Image (cartoon, rainbow, N blue to C red):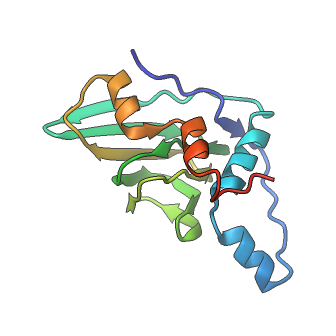
């Protein structure tokens, strides 16, 4: 059974960036924190939702999950339990990374640490692939092995997070 990808995406037809008035604001906006991502995700749920269907690939000891992100889509990713690769093979996307807000253009590859959750805004049609080291091929078992449920993550990290 293939996990569904619903409820985490919103489409923006027009993007307006607000001017940043001082260095402190710039620093706050550039620091990716889970509480900021969860707050944004909750607001995104109020927007029109689209479905993004992943394409799954398997090789000896590897699992790759590829998604096509249409231009203008703002999305959040899942919380990953393991270190893995992210490959941007097509497109132009701004992503909240561990190092702040970055505009990425294909081709681009980076390593994600465990506990990572991303936000992205596609400026062009984009193809994003995550690659995980695993021998598992059952999609339901993969989801359990690789993805942290939000509620479990929040419970484990409740002292580190301030959600408002």
**119 lies left or right of 27:** left
Image height of 19 relative to 63, above or below:
below
Q: Quadrant of residue 8?
A: top right
Q: Quadrant of residue 129?
A: top left
Closer to the camera in the image, 71 or 6 = 6
Residue at left offset 63%, top offset 55% = 34
Image height of 158 relative to 149, above or below:
below
Return the x and y of residue 56 as percentages of the image width and height. Answer: 33, 30
**137 lies left or right of 65:** left
**22 lies left or right of 105:** right
Return the x and y of residue 51 as percentages of the image width and height. Answer: 59, 26
Please identify the residue farthest to the bottom as the structure is shown. 23
- Numbered-mark total: 0
Does residue 61 appear anywhere in the picture?
yes
Q: Quadrant of residue 61?
A: top left
Return the x and y of residue 93 as percentages of the image width and height. Answer: 56, 56
Please identify the residue farthest to the left as the structure is shown. 60
Task: Name the image quarter holding the N terminus.
Answer: top left
Return the x and y of residue 80 as percentages of the image width and height. Answer: 44, 46
Residue at left offset 64%, top offset 61% = 33
Residue at left offset 24%, top offset 26% = 137
């Amino acid at each position: 059974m293939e996990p569904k990808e619903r409820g985490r995406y919103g489409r923006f037809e027009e993007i307006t960036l607000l001017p940043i008035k001082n260095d402190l604001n710039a620093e706050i906006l550039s620091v990716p924190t889970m509480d900021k991502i969860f707050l944004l995700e909750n607001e995104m749920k109020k927007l029109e939702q689209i479905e993004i269907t992943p394409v799954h690939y398997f090789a000896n000891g590897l699992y790759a999950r590829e998604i096509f992100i249409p231009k203008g889509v703002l999305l959040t990713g899942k919380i990953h339990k393991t270190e893995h690769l992210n490959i941007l093979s097509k497109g132009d996307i701004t992503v909240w990374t561990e190092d702040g807000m970055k505009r990425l253009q294909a081709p681009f590859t980076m390593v994600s640490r465990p506990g990572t959750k991303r936000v992205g805004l596609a400026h062009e049609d984009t193809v994003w692939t995550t690659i995980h080291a695993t021998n598992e091929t059952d999609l339901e078992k993969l989801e359990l092995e690789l993805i942290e449920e939000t509620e479990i993550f929040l419970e484990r990290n409740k002292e580190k997070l301030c959600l408002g």
